[in-house]
Amino acid sequence: MTATADSLAQPLLAQLLDLEIGKAYTREPLARHCSWHIGGPADVLVEPESVAQVARLVRFARRHAIPLLTIGQGTNLLFDDAGVRGIVLKIGARMADLRIEGNRILAEAGVWVPHLARQAARAGLGGLEHIIGIPGTLGGLVLMNGGSRRRGIGENVRRVWVIDPEGNERILGPEDCAFSYRHSALQEMGVIVVRAELECAPGDPRAIRRAMVCDLRERRLKFPRKEPNCGSVFLSTAEMHAGVGPPGKIIEEAGLKGTRIGGAEVSPRHANFIVNCGGASAADVLRLIAHIRQVVHERIGFDLRCEVRYVDPHARLMPADQAPRAAFRT
Ligand SMILES: Cc1cc2nc3c(=O)[nH]c(=O)nc-3n(C[C@H](O)[C@H](O)[C@H](O)COP(=O)(O)OP(=O)(O)OC[C@H]3O[C@@H](n4cnc5c(N)ncnc54)[C@H](O)[C@@H]3O)c2cc1C
């Protein structure tokens, strides 16, 4: 794949690489940074090691009007086949300190969620059992108000440290974050989560661990295990459950399990998962999403909405069902 005319100009790239911003890679395949293993190259991918480096990078990108996208483990993202013309800021293992003080956990955004859950269990802190099987980072989890069993991490969040679009550090409380089902106001603010403080309830470490083992066992039985995927593709709200049922059931009843477009397939194990059977492109996934939505709409008149977010070549994010038609071509 060749870069478009909009790629970062060489002098800017040189300036960026001269900044103290952590580890930087040029023309880095985004397929290496998401759980679907799909996506073209980013002009630059940076892995910062400190909050100061994140702030410096935000100010640089703003000064030069360079598109900037923050990601964690890429477990909820579909990158375009053309990649991203701009900077991808990956907050992961290089920013993953975690400290426990009494009932509170102070963790950097790059902490891996299953590790966070296990540390909480070890310290006898309950309330995070439902996140043990979520393979993303704390930053992504807070932004998405992720969770399972109809719960969200927002229930435990007491403070969130962010870098705002001007490059300033701010501390926000739960009232600023306005957590709701798989949503937080942080998404509209365009801030980068760098750290969060969580409050947990004291509990019996063995009981907490048992609940986690149980959750993981259930997931292993229900979800695809080997093929790359992005978790649940479609949103599953309480109103939807009451009205038409969960998306997996609706899609299965429409006879779509095993439907395949290119390398993308509706998982035969769980119909709300799309798996990459090998060589799937973003266009394959988007076409399959459009097909599922159309069949379901024709069958029961319901519009499925995506939880998974598509990233366009200008580093803009949107629910995958809102991807423009241009993205359907490889
Ligand atoms: C097998 C599997 C099972 C899953 N199960 C669940 C589940 O049970 N419940 C659930 O809620 N999700 C689930 N997911 C989806 C996903 O793991 C979560 O949404 C997770 O919280 C995303 O974290 P991430 O680090 O991968 O974020 P990414 O996918 O990298 O990014 C997701 C969003 O967060 C933003 N973001 C990431 N980091 C930051 C940051 N530091 N600051 C600001 N914005 C940031 C990105 O810009 C993007 O908008 C599952 C995924 C898989 C593959």
Image (cartoon, rainbow, N blue to C red):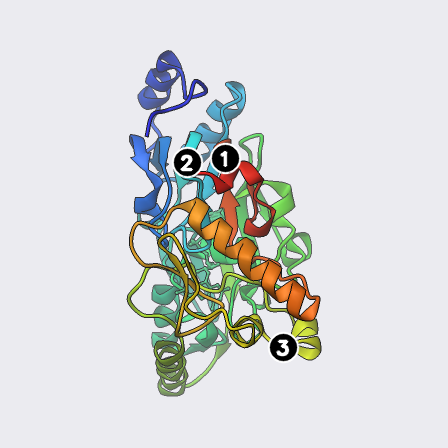
Do we see residue 142 in this rendering? yes
Circle 2 sits on which residue?
88
Badge 2 element: strand
Residue 136 position within the rendered picture, expressed as x and y whole percent measured from the top left: 40, 58
Report if the CB atoms under discs 2 and 3 are less than 8 Å apart.
no
Disc number at residue 315?
1
Kindly tell me whether mark 3's CB lies below 8 Å from ligand 1.
Answer: no
Q: Point out the image quarter for the C terminus.
A: top left
Identity, as a three-letter code, of the amino acid under mark 2: Val
Distance from disc 1 to disc 2, alpha carbons, whole Å, reads 8 Å
Disc number at residue 245?
3
Residue 123 position within the rendered picture, expressed as x and y whole percent measured from the top left: 37, 74
Disc number at residue 105?
none
Q: Which of 154 and 204 is in front in this view?
A: 154
Going 37% across and 21% down the picture, which residue do you hit?
16
Identity, as a three-letter code, of the amino acid under mark 3: Gly
Distance from disc 3 to disc 1, alpha carbons, whole Å, reads 34 Å
Report if the CB atoms under discs 3 and 1 are less than 8 Å apart.
no
Q: Point out the image quarter for the N terminus.
A: top left
Badge 1 element: loop
Mark closer to the chain start, 3 or 1: 3
Identity, as a three-letter code, of the amino acid under mark 1: Ala
Report if the CB atoms under discs 1 and 2 are less than 8 Å apart.
yes
Residue 266, by quadrant, is: bottom left
Mark closer to the chain start, 2 or 3: 2
Of discs 3 and 1, which sits in the foreground? 3
Going 58% across and 30% down the picture, which residue do you hit?
166
